[in-house]
Image: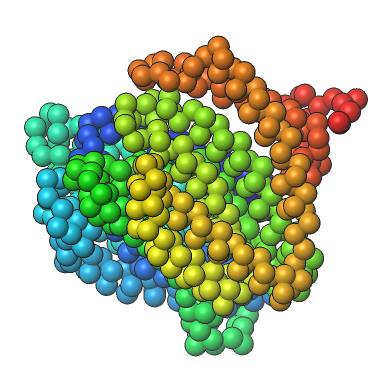
Amino acid sequence: MKKNSFVSGTFIATFAIILVKVLGVLYVIPFYKIIGEDGGALYSYAYNVYNLFLNISTAGIPIAISKIISEYNTLEMYEAKERAYKLGRNFIVIISVITFFLLFVFAEEFASLILGEITGGNTIEDVGFVIKSVSFCLLIIPFLSVAKGYMQGHEFITAPSISQVIEQIVRIAVILMGSYITINVLDKSVSLGVGISVFGAFLGGLSAFIYISYKIHKNKKLFEKDKTIKDKVTNKEIIKKIATYAIPFIIVSVATDIYGLTDMTLIVRASYNLGYSATESETIASIISTWSPKICMIINAIAMGLSTSLIPHIVSSFTKKNLKETNKKFNQALNIIIVVSLPLAIGLAILSTPVYNMFYGQSIYGPLILRYTSFQAIFASIFIVMGVALQGINKFKSVYLSTIIGFITNAILDIPLMYLFNYLGFNAFYGAILATIIGYIISYIIVLYSLKKSLNFNYKEITNTLIKVLIPTVSMCIVLFILNLFIKTNVNSRLESLLVCIPYAILGGITYLIISYKTGLLENVLGKDYIDNILTKLKIKNKDVKKC
């Protein structure tokens, strides 16, 4: 195995995550057809609660381990690095068992908290059952996360990325086969089918854990060099460092999940109170919290890939007190999100009707929600990377403030904005989407101000990127609007939707990439050497190309 640079590591991680997310998007086409809207709401409830407990069970330790491994490697403290990994792994055992027990035993209480007094849709017993089914994942996923964090801390990105693909393939196989056989062959209930489906996450995690454990064991010499030399740092100091690094991560992760859980709960209840039926309220909430975000996963995958690669590199720069390089990595991460995510979000918004129909079939609310949650995904991606960067450079106070204040803003505005939009004659759920975006913006202001004040960070590169990205973005929109004169997007069938999306994606993508390259935007963000290397490999490098 060989180590990955920041940009190559970012793209390896991002490619793997995009592949995982594409698989995750594609499987929902047959899965949603098998389980229907009520089953979709059940699936959404289970995963929102599970994600919250997963972040509690890992307690930020995987990313903390990645950070400590990178730090100790930079300082050549190899023995302490191995002790930190083992201590973190032992700590995970205790927390995982406790959180599994709590989620399994109190599953129906959580179901009751979500549904409240709503009647006519899914029952508390059904929701409780699927929550119990997914709770088993807490016994394996945290250990997988720690193992991946260990490898990423050594700047080995490829193996953890492959493990994600393995995890997703096994999980999808169980989801589709399990739900289809249970519901269509054995003629059992939808809730049982969904319960077996969510259990697939456990089997997927187990498969990935076996793979990554094998890779660590096979390459032991790369990880454990010079570990015979005892470092002066004590176990107590290492545990304190793990806790110090982990606490901010758990606050950010849990708050992010509470964002989703709060939105889901408030949207269900507010929609019901505003006159939507129980089924409509559950459908709207599940689309906002689960099904629309699944389509937006490719946008979020960029942030996840960046986070994976950013941690060891930004920690290394900060540990060496190279603030200029740290600032550069921070700006580069945000620039990549802006340049890649913006055209994806705009394209998704324009094609919201055919894209949603292609994946889930016709829906009254789906395309309307997707049109705006595609932009919400950009804000979420930026928030993820900002949070990781802050934690990598030990700005824990800013993490707490930006996350908590952003979350409180979102929670406070959710219901008032839903009622306001309903009063103005718009769909009430637009208010919930806007509340989330405002919460993210408040968080950004706190983060950027903190870094400017404490480390004198400069954001000129980000400002330049925001200006430069306008030219290819506007050009792409013009091309797509012209195309819309000939090919309309208001189609119904899945086949028509697919056929409509293809020319839009090809023409829009080519227009954006060519103009971004000609204006120098891609070179500014990714680096000239990296772009030249890609063009050389594709055999399309032309030395006489002149930029605008």
Q: Position of residue 149 (x, y in %)?
A: 51, 61
Q: Nearer the viewer, residue 408 or 508?
A: 408
Q: Is 71 positioned to the left or the right of 503 in the image?
A: right
Q: Above or below — where is 98 with respect to 207?
A: below
Residue drawn where x is 59% and y is 62% of the image: 444
Is residue 252 at all visible to an observer of this figure? no
Q: Residue furthest top?
A: 486
Which residue is drawn at the image coordinates 51% and 74% (left, top)? Answer: 400
Q: How many marks?
A: 0
Question: Which residue is painted at 64% across and 46% down in the image?
Answer: 338
Examine the rendering and report whether any part of residue 430 can be seen: yes
Locate residue 518, reporting x and y percent.
80, 31
Residue 219, compared with residue 474, is above or below; it is below
Looking at the rendering, in which quadrant would you find the C terminus?
top right
251, 208: nearer the viewer: 251
The picture places residue 258, in percent across and down from the top left corner, at 37, 62
Q: Quadrant of residue 36?
A: top left
Would residue 548 appear left or right of 488 to someone viewing this image? right
> How is the rendered protein coloured?
rainbow
In the figure, is residue 103 to the left or right of 147?
left
Q: Is residue 36 above or below residue 507?
A: below
Residue at left offset 69%, top offset 49%: 335
